[in-house]
Amino acid sequence: MEENINYEKIEINIWKNFFKYLKPYKLHFLILSIFMVFLGLLDALFPLLTKYAIDNFIEGKTLVGLEKFGLIYLMSVIALAFTVFMFIVLAGKLEMKMAYDIRRIGFEKLQILPLSYYDNKAVGWLMARMTSDIARLSETISWSLVDLAWGFSMMTAVTIAMIRLNYKLALITLSVIPFVGVISFYFQKRILKAQRDVRTINSKITAAYNEDIQGAKTTKTLVREDINLLEFSEITTSMRDNSIRATIISSIYLPIILTFGSIGTALALNFGGKNVLLNTISYGTLMAFVTYTTQFYEPIRQIAVIFAELQGAQASAERVFSLLNENPDIVDTAYVVEKYGDILNPKKELWPEIIGTVVFKNVDFAYKTGESVLEDFNLKVNPGETIALVGETGSGKSTIVNLFCRFYEPSEGQILIDNIDYKDMPQNWIHENLGYVLQSPHLFSGTIRENIRYGNLDATDEEIVEAAKLVDAHGFIMETEKGYDTEVGEGGGLLSTGQKQLISFARAIVRNPRLFVLDEATSSIDTETEKVIQDAIQKVLKGRTSFVIAHRLSTIRNADRILVINDGKILESGSHRELIKNKGHYYRLYTNQFMEEREFTL
């Protein structure tokens, strides 16, 4: 997914947006900034101590007060060491806590966003924001931003000290500052654009990694290794070129700043040296000025680095907040949230029990692309009725089911559950009462028991076994070495497709849902396993309002009603027997498929 990003300037609103996430740590950040200011003042103190030592102990050729001076110097060193220690400790804690908070908020956002959000978002796109972008942002704020407090406090203290020592020499030494400002402004846009390009390509690389790993089997079977390598090399080459470009820009910028710092030091030596020879300033004052010019331009050099890091951090911030500030397509009203709770804080005790009547009333629906799928669609489903949806790919079957599940909402019209517009209830009201089995079931790493319990975290071991028995999964589970404690592997990779499907059935049934959806649940399995799952379907759907999207028409012969969908409209409706008798569209689909399967078996 490409993003429209303004490359022209630093966006103040982005940083204002970020600082609201810093509020829980404002005291922590304030204390850290105070330590950095104190560190800047301490750094400015040491040249004055050096000046005093030179003028009094070397030029004055006396040791009077040396012990007192040594004690003051020692205390200053201890204070400096303690301040640096506290800076490292506080900045490290701030970085980790901020990254944790933003990731937690981001993950909560991903739970709240509807299914439509994921339609055009690659996994790598999201992973890059939740990992590297957030890490970059928290690191920059925790370390670089507080360095600004040190830099500005030190530069202020050094400027004041230089003016008090000799204001003429101070003005001469600092005369290069306007040139530094002009150069910084010139490089700002270029560094920002380069860093944004790098972050954008980084997301593409993460997405490519994810797709290639997940599609490893397809890659092998299609012999695409060389093509994948070529495509990935193009992305990484682009990453390399843009990273080099960003580095070159920064590497040009920093030496220029250092050059001007050296010019400032040269001016101090030139004019200060003449004044020493004329005895208008002391040798200790000259040494203090030389040290101060080095110290003054060190923060400028650091600020230049911080400036470059902030450019990169803004690119990360833009990408993170594009996720955090995403407005969901489906939002519960304030009244619904107040009365029934939201997704993360539901008030389930106030939810009415679902009986199972479902009504589509004059429903229109179009995707964001503008593609219209349903127009004036009407359907009534009675409690406990099983509705099978058949039709060509793109006919609208999945859209009907997604609207029923409230993964999407109608553009016009209403969907009523037990005569209640489901927009008048929280989204979880449907989802908590929904069992959903996909064509390609997804299992999580862990045991069979844990995967079934995902359907109902409060389920007892007895309820898990009962659900497995109901869907005829108990037999094969007990044949495994560890039974219900058998590891399924990542994505269920240690089990067959049929076994994963049976476990997904058990996971759906253990929550005892009133509503059920089967989305091509038998299309990826062999006929022997299909018979087992078909028996499981009959048990699972009994007494539940169900929608079944079927590829194999033989699996829906027992449905209460079969709807033939075409271009978002119902062409035919009736039982299997009735539709076969009518010899219409369903009859042709069924007989053609029957003949194809018969030829295949022969």
Image (cartoon, rainbow, N blue to C red):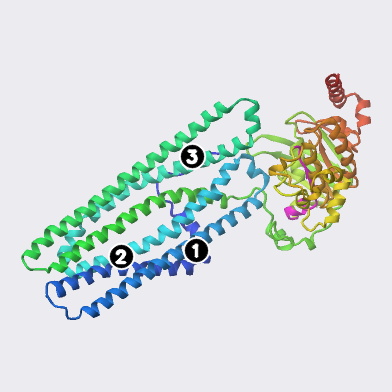
Residue 93 is tagged as 1
Amino acid type at circle 3 is: Ile
Side of 60 where 111 appears, left or right: right
Observer-nearest of 232 and 419: 232
Identify the residue shown where x is 53% and y is 57%. 99
Q: Is residue 441 visible?
A: yes
User: Which residue lies under the disc numbered 3?
Assistant: 201
Q: In screen coordinates, is 305 left or right of 574?
A: left
Instruction: Give the mark toward the camera: 3 or 1.
Output: 1
The x and y percentages for residue 204 are 53, 39
| Residue corresponding to mark 2 | 154
Label 2 to label 1, Cα distance in Å?
Answer: 24 Å
CB atoms of marks 3 and 2 within 8 Å:
no
Closer to viewer: mark 2 or mark 1: 1
Question: Closer to the camera, 183 or 350?
Answer: 183
| Residue 418 appears in the figure | no
Q: In the image, what residue type sits under mark 1? A: Lys
In the picture, measured across the screen, residue 344 lies left or right of residue 404, that is left
